Amino acid sequence: MATKTKSIDTQCADTIRALSIAMVEQAKSGHPGGPMGGADFMHVLYSDFLRFDPDNPEWRWRDRFFLDPGHLSAMLYAQLHLVGFYQASEIEQFRQWESPTPGHPEVDRP
């Protein structure tokens, strides 16, 4: 019997979905629907197209990505956690007062 394995891209997108659900659940606030549908594109965007350096978020030549709807903020923070911009303790504070991960991303976020 052959073993079916998930691709790394699928695993990453599923992780974004799981983290997004956990963040919304813990905050008791937020929108889980958008991250469920957008996780694949978010992962591919960050893994295959955008140039950035988590160790140097102010890198002059980095690409910029603007996410308008706050309904997708959990997905954005989950992806940024996977690439090293946020620690787990920071995404656990999603939508909390003075959190580094507010419900609507600010311009000073990576």
Image (cartoon, rainbow, N blue to C red):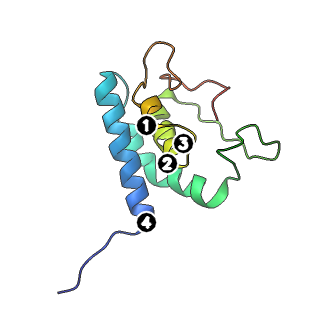
Q: Which mark is residue 8?
A: 4
Label 3: element kind: helix
- Amino acid carrying mark 4 in the image: Ile
Place of residue 110 in the rendered image (x, y in percent of width and height, measured from the top left): 64, 35
Q: What is the CA distance from the residue labelled 1 to the residue labelled 2? A: 9 Å
- How would you rate the neighbour count of disc 2 (Cα within 10 Å): few for under 14, some for 14-19, many for 20 or more? some
Label 1: element kind: helix
- Amino acid carrying mark 3 in the image: Leu
- How would you rate the neighbour count of disc 3 (Cα within 10 Å): few for under 14, some for 14-19, many for 20 or more? many
Q: Quadrant of the N terminus?
A: bottom left
Q: Badges 1 and 3: C-beta atoms under 8 Å apart?
A: no
Q: What is the CA distance from the residue labelled 4 to the residue labelled 1? A: 20 Å
Which residue is tagged 2? 82
Q: What is the CA distance from the residue labelled 1 to the residue labelled 3? A: 10 Å
Q: Badges 2 and 3: C-beta atoms under 8 Å apart?
A: yes
Which residue is tagged 3? 80
Specify which label sits upstream in the sequence, 1 or 3: 3
Place of residue 84 in the rendered image (x, y in percent of width and height, measured from the top left): 55, 45
Please state which of the two labelled residues, at mark 1 or mark 2, is closer to the viewer.
Answer: 1
Q: Residue furthest left?
A: 1
